[in-house]
Amino acid sequence: MTEQKEQVLPLFYKNPQAITFEQHGNLGLTGRQNYLFAQKANSIPLVTSEYAVAAKHYPIVFIKDEVKTSLVITGFRDGENVFVNDNGEWAKDQYIPGYVNRYPFIFLEDEANDQLVLCMDVDAEIVNSTGENPLFKDSKPTEFAENALKTCTEYQSYLNATREFVTALIDQDLLVENQAELTAPDGKALRLTGFCVIDETKFKELSDETILDWHKKGWLYLAYAHFVSMSNWAKIAQLTQSDAPVSTETVH
């Protein structure tokens, strides 16, 4: 594994390592994992190719720091994903983000060689030496491993497209800090901060030139999907448990 200089690990990942036959030749994955690893995530990264379907299920928000990404909100309290139960089951008929489904695989940067390498969280529960989906056979990557590489390659391209879109939102000064406030069934106040939304007034004031450019790039549709997704705050409110005191939480 390439040394990472005090790098904060990506969400969910505990011990990601670059996959090699020498280190991981005997490893594989068991069948479909549960989603307990995502049970404490109150927000999850989302790429633009997912906006259309995700907008039907979750609020889509933005982070405009150096990460420049979009997220779906999955809970109001830190450490609570209201869509995953104690058995690790995702709520029925709810869209599961691609970031979740690619786990335990991920692309990480190999700074020494200035490239991205396929990594795997070797501490994931479904990774072991007896898994029915081995990574290697006869010292060569299996079809399962090749599919993991393909999935992560596609996701990376979508991630780059997402950063381009969010950067455009920032350049047009469209992102504004926002917070969500809900009242739980028992009357307790819940407040979520640390995220941005698109300022509708500024969006409507975009120049004709920008509107045409964004239309050609498909970005107008992405903005509209974000606006539509705001109706899902009510769903989060209904699913939020009401056994905690008044709190202010931040998107992580």
Image (cartoon, helix red, strand yellow):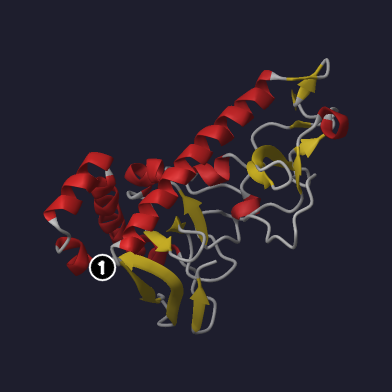
Q: Name the residue located 75 percent from the left edge and 55 percent from the top edge.
A: 4
- Image-based side of 248 in relation to 144, left or right: left
**Residue 213's x, y, as percent?**
21, 46
Please say if 72 is above or below 100: below
- Residue lying farthest front? 113
Q: Nearer the viewer, residue 132 or 99?
A: 99
Lateral position of residue 91 relative to residue 197, left or right: right
Residue 132 vs residue 169: left or right?
right
| Residue 50 to residue 9: above or below | above
Name the residue that disc number 1 marks: 199
The quarter of the rendered structure image containing the N terminus is: top right
| Residue 105 position in % (x across, y down) | 66, 39
The amino acid on which the numbered mark 1 sits, given as a three-letter code, is Asp
Q: Which element type, helix, strand or loop, lies under badge 1?
A: loop
Horizontal and vertical percent for residue 137?
Answer: 80, 17
Q: Is residue 101 above or below residue 4?
A: above
- Asked if residue 124 can be seen in this view, the reply is yes
| Neighbourhood count class around disc 1 (C-alpha, 10 Å): few under 14, some 14–19, many 20 upward | some
Direction from residue 241 to residue 209 in the image, left or right = left
Residue drawn 28% across and 60% down? 231
Q: Is residue 87 visible?
A: no
Q: Nearer the viewer, residue 153 or 243?
A: 153
Q: Which quadrant of the rendered structure holds the C terminus?
A: bottom right
- The single residue placed furthest to the top in the displayed view is 138
Q: At 32% across and 59% down in the image, what residue appears?
A: 169
Front residue of 213 and 34: 213
